[in-house]
Image (spheres, rainbow, N blue to C red):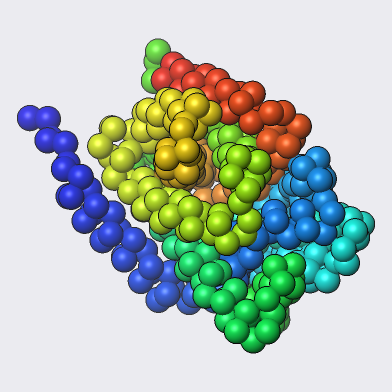
Amino acid sequence: MQPQPKTLAAAAREALLTQARELERFWHTPALRLPMLCVWTASFGGALHYPCTTYFYLLLGATKRDIGNFGLVVYWPDVVLAPVYGHVVDARGAYPPIVATACSCALGCLVRGVAPVGGLGWLYAGNLIIGLGASNLWTSVLSHATRHTETARREACVSAFLFQVAALRILGKGAYVPCVRILAALGVAEPLRQYRVLMVVCPLFCGFSIIFLALRGVCNPRTPVPTEDPEDVAAKAPASALLQDEDDAVVGWGPFSVVAGAVFVDAVCRTTIAVLWPLYGRDLYGWGGSAFAGPYFLEGLASTAAVGLAPSLSSYAGTMARASSVLAALAAALAVLARDAPAALFSPAFICLQAVLAAKDPLGKALGTLSLPRRHQGRAVGRAFAALGALRALGDGVGHVVATRLSADVALLGVAAALAAQAGALAAARLRK
């Protein structure tokens, strides 16, 4: 008898239980506790200035094209450096790359925060320093956590990690307006000065990672990683058998290539929307940081819920690949809606679109490591995440170009077309997970 589909309430309960179990595991596993604490603090601190970063750049004299260039400067170094960090995670452990990436993030944010009006060179320098490793802080910790997770639980691990990061970013975004009001009560009423304070405060949160990880790294630079015997992996019908031929034999690196392409497209589309939304809101409705903070906070809530429900969605759809295909088609339709939305539906369309793309994120990351050839399971997870991270960084760079070089209408149509093509490709591929 075929199992009955879960109701939405049952799926939500299951998702919450999964999140709670993974949170408990992260906290009670000695090898994971401190790296996760670093990610938790950095996620909250970084989100404090998210609502005002674009408007901070504009008040310093940056143009729309400059903002696109900043994205290129931040993300494209990752294309080269992400594989380096991934190799170090596999070869030396997670502590050295976490400390290095946290230092990069803190110093780059500080340089941006103290940039003078008209000091575009400061902004380019700050973003370049951030690009030397900041985004790899999250990638390094996620690959570390995944290497300490058995294959069958990897989807839950990735989903829980992203859910916790997203939840803390919600808290950071939600704290933006109270922080601005506190600054105003203290006499810091000018928007530029408020933005600057929030930008400069961000490095303090990365300082936790730098100090405590450096101390821990000296004492215990490498934590043993649980391994699985290849015979046991084979007996469990390995998740690496995602793409199979008529004889049911594993086809090399084909599965990973399919998933990697989907991760790249997701990065392009999600970054395009993230960059375009506040600029589009400014052009249409005269938005500033405070006006954007409310819709941005709601988007965080919706995206976090979507990330938490991702494992249940894949269970409901039957496979992670099938769920990704359906979500890609839905996101394509929402991109068209956002392009033609009336004023009342402008923000809801962008919020729903970002939430759907957020739900695809853990599915893509989990599929990426599960699609590794059998002999690499548990041994090259860091490099797999690094490869996906490099593609994501490349996609982020392309997304900044699309959002800032093309008109909003053309950019949104491009996003819709890319997602529709991805939905078709995932449906046509013989992905088993």
Q: Is residue 306 left or right of residue 275?
A: left
The residue positioned farthest toward the left in the image shown: 1
Q: Is residue 58 left or right of residue 248?
A: right
Q: Which is nearer the eye, 387 or 296?
A: 296
- 216 over 68 or under it: above or below: below
Residue 339 visible in the picture: yes
Q: Which is nearer the eye, 97 or 200?
A: 200
- 149 over 351 or under it: above or below: below
Q: Which is nearer the eye, 215 or 358?
A: 358
Q: Could you tell me which quadrant the C terminus lies in? A: top left
Q: Residue at x 64, y 31 (%)?
A: 408
Q: Is residue 195 left or right of residue 343?
A: right
The residue positioned farthest toward the top in the image shown: 246
Q: Which is nearer the eye, 122 or 205?
A: 122
What is the tally of numbered marks visible in this picture?
Answer: 0
The residue positioned farthest toward the bottom in the image shown: 186
Q: Residue at x 31, y 66 (%)?
A: 20
Q: Residue at x 80, y 40 (%)?
A: 65
Percent across and percent down for residue 401 are: 74, 35
Percent across and percent down for residue 387 are: 65, 42
Residue 252 visible in the picture: no
- 244 over 77 or under it: above or below: above
Q: Could you tell me which quadrant the N terminus lies in? A: top left
Percent across and percent down for residue 386 are: 65, 48
Q: Residue at x 42, y 40 (%)?
A: 344
Percent across and percent down for residue 407 are: 69, 28
